[in-house]
Amino acid sequence: QVHLEESGGGVVQPGGSLRLSCAASGFTDFPFSSYALNWYRQAPGREREFVAAITRAGDNTVYADSVKGRFTLSRDNAKNMMFLQMNSLKLEDTAVYYCNAVRGSRGSWGQGTQVTVSS
């Protein structure tokens, strides 16, 4: 069973940066490199929303308009890791951030890491 664990969240001032990591394990049937990866976030009182996605080979990324130009998504298939570099953070980026791995109809979620942007 695929297990995902996020880390790197914290409290940061507006304009600051954070780097989130997602460590993946439990790939018994298919390798990590066969999964598309995503980040989602959920702010208090709001629905979970898409943040960014990266292809299996890591050669293409897609970002929500709200984070485009500020966030950068990458993955290391050799280490079963995914990273979200978040720069120029805004108050509205405050949320719990979740990593998600998808292969066909199979999807797995981590428990999330809290990001708080506050002055």
Image: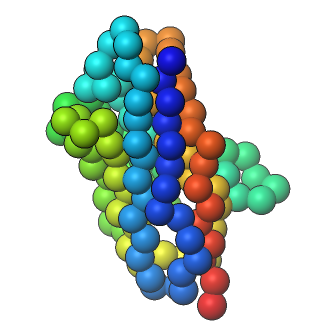
Q: Judge from the rendering whether residue 70 lies leftward or rightward of residue 4; answer left or right.
A: left
Q: Residue sitting at 43 percent across and 58 percent down?
A: 20
Instruction: Give the image location of residue 19, x and y in percent.
Output: 39, 65
Q: Residue sitting at 56 percent across and 71 percent down?
A: 10
Can residue 97 be seen in the rendering of this structure? Answer: yes
Closest to the observer: 44 or 64? 44
Closest to the observer: 72 or 2? 2
Instruction: Give the image location of residue 27, x and y in percent.
Output: 38, 19
Q: Residue furthest right?
A: 45
Instruction: Give the image location of residue 24, x and y in percent.
Output: 41, 35
Q: Judge from the rendering whether residue 91 lies leftward or rightward of residue 65; answer left or right.
A: right
Quadrant assignment, res 111: top right
Q: Judge from the rendering whether residue 67 lies leftward or rightward of residue 56; answer left or right.
A: right
Can residue 49 be seen in the rendering of this structure? Answer: no
Q: Residue sitting at 49 percent across and 56 percent down?
A: 7
| Residue 69 versus residue 96 in the image, above or below | below
Counting every numbered tag in the picture gives 0
Q: Residue sitting at 19 percent across and 36 percent down?
A: 78
Quadrant assignment, res 43: bottom right
Closest to the observer: 6 or 119? 6
